[in-house]
Each structure stands twice: as structure tokens, then as C-alpha cells.
Image: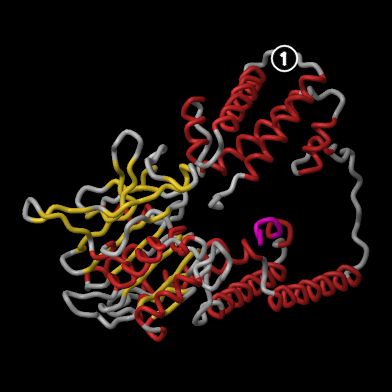
Amino acid sequence: MHFSVITPTLARTPSVRGTLRIVLTLVCIALDASAEARTEEGVSGASPAFSTNSSSWEGLSEFVRLAETRIGADRVKVRAKLDFDTLEPNDAVLILHPEVTLDGEALTGFLAAGGRVAIVDDFGTAPDFLEGFNVRRIPAPLNPVLVVDHNPNLAIAVPVSHEVNGFARSRHPMTEQVDLVVTNHATAFSHPALTPILEIEGATGATLPIAVTGVIQKNGRLVAVGDPSIFINLMLRYPGNRAFATGLVDYLQAGEGVQRRGRLFIVSGRFSQSGSYGEPSARDELLSRLRTVTAALSQVDQEGLPPHLALFLAVLAALWLVRFEIYEQLKGAAVVLPSFARAPSLVGQSGLLGRAELLAAPTTTPLLGVLELSAALEESVGEQLGEPAPSDPAELGRRLTLVGLGEGEASAAVRLLVELRGYQRLVGEGKRVRSSERELKRIHGEVKSMLGVMKRSSRRPEA
């Protein structure tokens, strides 16, 4: 839905501008209604990897059933929309792998009133919210002591014991029945004052927490866990993971020695947010409506238009074209003034055709093709890392191994990027570079192979 592409061409007359305003208004209304319809009870707003209603190996349906068994199905509320207006101090909110910006004001207000919030996230959008409580996400140990099937990505976390009165040691209530928890590409946390719950020990003997908790403004409880994969259907086959899931649900509903009897709201992925905790202001309501429309547009961008809306827009476009064609026919022949300027060549035009003709022109150096390959590989590596590839080769290799590439694959990617960046530098300095056809074919083959490696890299556990 790129309206900016068509607006400069069509908005030349008042009638067309008016038609466009009507179309855009109807689209926003339809998108808003579509977003509201998707927030019905029990509908998950997550991607398939962490969908609360998916029974696949990477879904969360088993976790939802565990929670319903533990505290009652009537108290577990799976939502695709988190409405802060409906929350009460005895309620709890569990957010798994968020892919939207969390409403920090509403969540903090809920915590201050005594609510409980658990953020379970490894590579999602939680850091902005957690950093407000001085909790930073950091990499877990690269060479953990305990792993599954010799796979460092499947590190085993253990409960943290705390000293009481200087000599006795005890665990947090969430891990009282936990021995070992199997993780999958977990991330750790750096924090100044929160209580660590689970930790991973590295080969050097240093330990890093992957789960922490703390009291917020003397009332609420915040829990942060650095791996939502702990709770997916495949991983709940491990007794320790299931015990930790049970402990988390119990803790979110436990008061000072009594059951809170509140509700547990579970959201994941691209869920929407509305309202505010406490008395809403006009600004809060406006922001809520904007969030709803933004979330709906994001949904459209990911999944396409709903069928009924696509049909409506198609009919509207057809009617507009018929009206435009009739108007052109009735207004009579237009006077064509003589022109002495030739149409510009495709090379002088922007867009895909101009780019293709420029690269294929016999006067174009083959090195421009190499630069295109370099840009494609840089973009693929950036997507793999979640940020632009670092310029330092050693740091680039380290980062690639952190996201799951083998040492050989990471080394090959670094070598190829360094070579391509050398071509970029020489071309940028205006120097003449001679490369044989054989050399260019080699570079093309290696880049194509490396792009395949990047595409195949996945986070699916091997156990």
C-alpha cells in the first residue's frame, strides 16, 4: 500500500484529490474495522514461530493448556489485543516474543498499581521497555558448560541459589521444582539490582542470568526471561522446562502468601495495544486509535489485504477508471503542441528498467555487477545480524557465529565481504580495475552460495 506512488500523478485536479481523500478515508476505516475483528477472544497475534494457538513444534498451545490447567481456563485470557483499560491490579500480563513497540507508560502504571508483568523475549522488541528499569539484553555465554547434544545453541540453564542470613541457600519460588532448563539461542541480561532466577555458566566459569525478577515501586512484580523457546511445544517435553513454566504461571498469580485470583493475559508477536492504565486522557485515546490503525497497516504489509477489502478497493478503482475514461472521451480532442525534445532513454530514467539497461549496456564496466552482488550480500548479512554489518572483519566473524553460522561459514562470509569491499573502495576512488571473466564468475558463484547459506540459517533446535 504505497499511496505516495500514485498521489503525485493523480492529484492534479480538485475532483481527483477529493476522490483520493475519500478512498484513503474508507481504507483507514476498513483497516481499523479489520484490526478490531482480529482481536476477538482466542485469536493469536503472533508469527507462526510463537503462536499461542499453534500445535506445531514451535507453537505455544501446550503452554496455554498448562496455564489453563494450573489456574483455570476462565482466568487465562489469550488475546491479539492488550486493552489496558480492562486490567485490574490483581491481573498479570505475559508477553512472549513481542514484535511491536511496548506501551511503556501503560505497563509501568499497571506495575505501580500492583500488577505483574512477565516479558519473555530473546530477539524481539522488549529492550526499549526493559531498559527503563536498567535491564539490558546481552549475549549469553558462547561456550556454555552444559549443553544438549554438544550444541552450544542449546545451552542448559540452572536455578540460582541465594544466601539467606549469611549461610542458608534457597531458590526463587519460580524454580523450586526446577533442576535444569533447556534453552534455544537464549540471550542474557545485565542488571544492577534485580534478582537472578536462571543462569548459564560459560567455559570460563562466569555465569550470566537469562531470567531475572524484581519489585517495581514496592507493588508490582516484573519478570524478564531471555528465551521464549523455553515454552514452545517441542521444549516443554523437558521436565525442567515444564516445571519452570508452571512456576512462572504460579508466581504471576501468587500474592503475599495467598492466591491473587486475578486473570492472566497472554499476548505474543504482533499484538495490538489500546487504552491506558488509570484514567485515560484525550491524548491517550488518540494514541490508542493511531496504534490500532498502525498495527492494521503493519498486518496488511505482512499478510496482504483482507479479501473483502481487496474486492471493495478493486470495485472502487474500476468505477473511478470508467468515470475517468468517459470524461476523457467527452471533453474532445486535446490540442497537441509540437515538441522538439526526444524522449529520455531508459538509462536516464529511474526504476528497474533503467537499472537493468544500465547494467547490460556494452559500455558499462562488469565491475558494476560485482558492486550489485556486494550490496546484496551486505544486505543479507545485515538482516542476519539485525543491524548493518560491522567494518571490522574480526568483529563481523564473531557476530556471525553468534547468530548461528558455523566457524567455516562465518570465515567464508568475512573473506568474501572483505574482497567485495575492496572492489567498492577501488571503484569509489576512480581507479581502473581489471578482472577476468573467470574471476567475475567465481565471485558471482561464491556470493550466490553465501546468500543461500544466509537463507538456510535457522533457529530450529537440533534436539
- Residue 24 coordinates in the image, percent (x, y): 63, 70
Badge 1 is on which residue?
433
| Residue 386 x/y as whole percent | 51, 44
Residue 39 placement, left or right of 285: right
Q: Is 461 drawn above or below residue 97 in the view shown?
A: above
**Which image quadrant for residue 9?**
bottom right
Q: Is residue 5 magenta?
A: yes
> Residue visible at 41% across and 38% down?
142
Residues drawn in magenta: 1-6
- Which image quarter is the N terminus in? bottom right
Q: Nearer the viewer, residue 204 or 24?
A: 204
Mark 1: which amino acid?
Val
| Horizontal and vertical percent position of residue 3 | 66, 61
Relative side of 342 to 358, left or right:
right
Please, is residue 411 above or below residue 235 in the view?
above
Tell whether 209 sits left or right of 343: left
Residue drawn 37% across the image and 40% down it: 145
Secondary structure mostly seen in magenta is helix
Along the line of sight, the residue nearer the viewer: 349 or 173:
173
Residue lying furthest bottom: 74
Q: Please tell me how crowded label 1 is: few (under 14), some (14-19), or many (20+) other residues with Cα within 10 Å.
A: few
